[in-house]
């Protein structure tokens, strides 16, 4: 998650709908919403961007003076976190416990070692001894939280990385910012993670699509009137060495990039923070364990599996119920 860059913009559209866009977390964000007549577009944009900037200041590992970066370099001890960061840490560590470490937000040192963090890219895998050393300093069980004081324990050398959940939380904060300004029909998107409420400019549920990892293959359409959609996959951030593909999502049990045959996992959930983290957790669990985990907990999830040069698709019962109600919907506002 990189600091915000660039300038935002907005434009009017039909039926009092407006489109806003800006930059944050090393990517772009977009909002389409129906504005009450008494709300100025400039004020709404400013509040959304300010909230995202605050999240970056707390959770970025690409910003040396962020709260999280400071925590990662702090000596052993307890440290009080600001409310937003504590909420995200609590959610991430709860998921780590529930998945028995298949999801782990303390892999920041390994992320850097593999060239997917702020220290820059690499063009070949790190030495196994370096990986083993990072593994000894990582692990969600090495830390603890104090809910009363918003405290987090730094055991020394533990590097948190919230890139698998912070964007989703940012989307939720964008949505809550809109609702605090009496905006209740919207689509908000940040780096591909999405949350919607209400209807679009045509008075219909929002038309979304789950992207295929293979260029040229059709996306999977679905419509939502309330909820969030997030995807985690192996096809955007990666490098190739000696013909082997190394993706950015690491297996906490080995310290190496995942190689379980999954191309991506998408999750539909009421909150984007949960959808974002769960998509990564299910990707790490793999198809069989991930499907069992999702079915047991009623998670609406889609698994895309690499089969030679094609993609196979499996989804949970909860997602099937959503897809069954999906109809062709125009997405224009």
Image: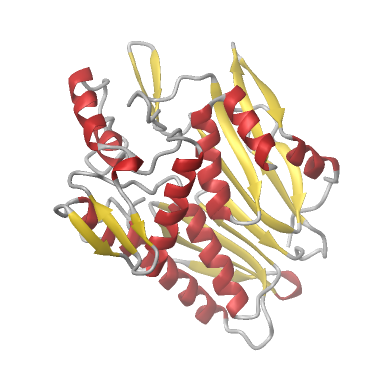
Given residues 91 and 167, the one toward you in this image is: 91
Q: Residue at x 47, y 48 (%)?
A: 94
Looking at the rendering, in which quadrant would you find the C terminus? bottom right
Check the image and name the residue furthest to the left: 75
**Image label count:** 0
Q: Residue at x 64, y 29 (%)?
A: 291
Give the answer, above or below, for where 97 lies relative to 60. Answer: above
For residue 309, which quarter of the picture? top right
In the rendered view, how is the structure colored? secondary structure
Q: Position of residue 305 (x, y in %)?
A: 61, 22
Give the answer, above or below, for where 145 lies relative to 287. Answer: below
Check the image and name the residue furthest to the bottom: 38
Left or right of residue 106, residue 196 in this image:
right
Given residues 152 and 51, the one toward you in this image is: 152
Q: Residue at x 39, y 68 (%)?
A: 83
Given residues 30 and 137, the one toward you in this image is: 137
Left or right of residue 157, residue 187 in this image:
right
Q: Position of residue 308 (x, y in %)?
A: 59, 11
Give the answer, above or below, for where 39 lies relative to 74. Answer: below
- Can residue 214 be seen here? The reply is no
Left or right of residue 180, residue 170 in this image:
left
Q: Residue at x 45, y 37 (%)?
A: 103
Q: Position of residue 140 (x, y in %)?
A: 35, 42
Q: Position of residue 228 (x, y in %)?
A: 64, 53
- Can residue 322 be seen here? The reply is yes
Left or right of residue 264, residue 117 in this image:
left
């Amino acid at each position: 998650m990189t600091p915000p860059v660039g300038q935002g913009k907005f434009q009017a559209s039909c039926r009092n709908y407006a489109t806003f866009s800006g930059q944050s977390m090393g990517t772009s964000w977009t909002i389409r919403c129906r504005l009450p007549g008494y709300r100025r577009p400039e004020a709404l944009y400013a509040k959304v961007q300010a909230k995202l900037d605050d999240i970056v200041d707390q959770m970025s590992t690409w910003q040396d003076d962020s709260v999280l970066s400071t925590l990662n370099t702090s000596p052993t001890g307890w440290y009080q976190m600001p409310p937003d960061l504590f909420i995200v840490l609590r959610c991430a560590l709860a998921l780590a416990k529930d998945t028995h470490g298949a999801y782990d937000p303390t892999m920041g040192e390994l992320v850097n070692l593999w060239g997917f963090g702020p220290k820059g890219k690499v063009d070949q895998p790190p030495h196994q001894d370096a990986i083993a050393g990072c593994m000894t300093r990582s692990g969600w069980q090495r830390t603890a939280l104090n809910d009363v004081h918003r405290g987090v324990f730094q055991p020394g050398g533990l590097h948190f990385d919230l890139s698998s959940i912070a964007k989703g939380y940012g989307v939720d904060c964008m949505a809550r910012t809109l609702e605090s300004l009496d905006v209740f029909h919207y689509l908000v998107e940040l780096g591909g993670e999405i949350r919607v409420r209400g209807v679009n400019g045509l008075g219909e549920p929002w038309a979304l699509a789950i992207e295929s990892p293979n260029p040229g293959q059709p996306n999977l359409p679905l419509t939502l009137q309330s909820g969030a959609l997030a995807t985690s996959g192996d096809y955007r951030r990666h490098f190739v060495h000696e013909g082997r593909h190394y993706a950015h999502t690491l297996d906490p049990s080995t310290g190496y990039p995942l190689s379980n045959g999954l191309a991506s996992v998408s999750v539909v959930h009421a909150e984007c923070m949960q959808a974002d983290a769960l998509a990564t957790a299910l990707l790490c669990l793999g198809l069989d364990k991930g499907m069992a985990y999702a079915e047991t907990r009623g998670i609406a999830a889609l698994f895309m599996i690499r089969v030679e040069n094609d993609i196979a698709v499996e989804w949970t019962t909860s997602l099937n119920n959503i897809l069954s109600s999906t109809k062709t919907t125009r997405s224009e506002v």
